[in-house]
Amino acid sequence: MRCGRGFLLLGVLIVGCTPAGGRRVEAPALSPQDAAEKAMAEYDGNKDGVLDAKELEKCPSLKSALPRFDANSDGKLSKREIEDKLQGYRDSMTGIVAVPCRVLVDGRAMSGLSVTFEPESFLGPSFKPATGTTEDDGTISLRTEGYDVEGLPFGLYRVKVSKMNSSGQESIPARYNAQTTLGQEIGPDMRGDIVIKVTQR
């Protein structure tokens, strides 16, 4: 693998690299200004120029990213705060990062769980879902649609966890898949493994 420059995130990374025999790993096209405007248009229900706690409930990824996005620590997100963080993604020139991830169901590892990191629509059409299946220890290798290496681009994602039972019915509650409340930022400020916790109760 021939690499330009490195960027540490969650242990392993690929930045501006060309895998042997493959193509250069490029970040998806992102307009921070457009994305921030779309996020506000979609979630700022009372049109007061900020996303408050109630409004953030509708966007799990932004809710999870609040501590890192909230520059003035007022518990809300403005268009500028969202735009500034997304600009940081673009300025990093990071193509894709490997993300150590583990899923626990009622505190225990479970194999065969289907996991999807679905990018927020306001990021634009260049962002694609990343998927994978858990191993016996709950770990998962995520691969993004359109890439020939494991990992995800910097972005904001809704996380969906699913497992069908022997009757073909979903065994994981809807709050973790069809109506997911799980969100995750993949960004330069992240450190350590991602642990996704779900309960079947």
Image (spheres, rainbow, N blue to C red):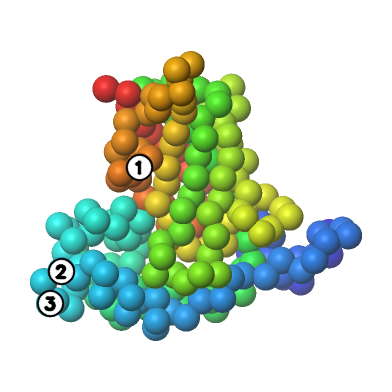
Residue 113 location, x and y as percent? Answer: 51, 30
The amino acid marked with disc number 1 is Ala
| Element at label 2 | loop
Determine if residue 39 is in view.
yes
Q: Are marks 3 and 2 in contact (CB under 8 Å)?
A: no
Question: How far separated are the C-alphas under marks 3 and 1?
Answer: 29 Å
Residue 44 location, x and y as percent? Answer: 19, 70
Question: How far separated are the C-alphas under marks 3 and 2?
Answer: 8 Å
Q: Are marks 2 and 1 in contact (CB under 8 Å)?
A: no
Residue 58 location, x and y as percent? Answer: 24, 56
| Element at label 3 | loop
Against 54, residue 38 (above or below) is: below
Q: Earlier in the sequence, mark 3 or mark 1?
A: 3
Relative to residue 91, is residue 58 drawn left or right?
A: left
| Element at label 1 | loop
The amino acid marked with disc number 2 is Gly
Against 105, residue 42 (above or below) is: below
- Mark closer to the observer (3, 2): 2
Question: Which residue lies under the disc numbered 3?
Answer: 48
Q: Quadrant of the C terminus?
A: top left
Q: Earlier in the sequence, mark 2 or mark 1?
A: 2
Determine if residue 9 is in view.
no
The mark found on residue 178 in the picture is 1
Residue 11 location, x and y as percent? Answer: 61, 49
Between 165 and 38, the one lying in front of the other is 165
Question: Which residue lies under the disc numbered 2?
Answer: 45
Relative to residue 46, is residue 8 drawn left or right?
A: right
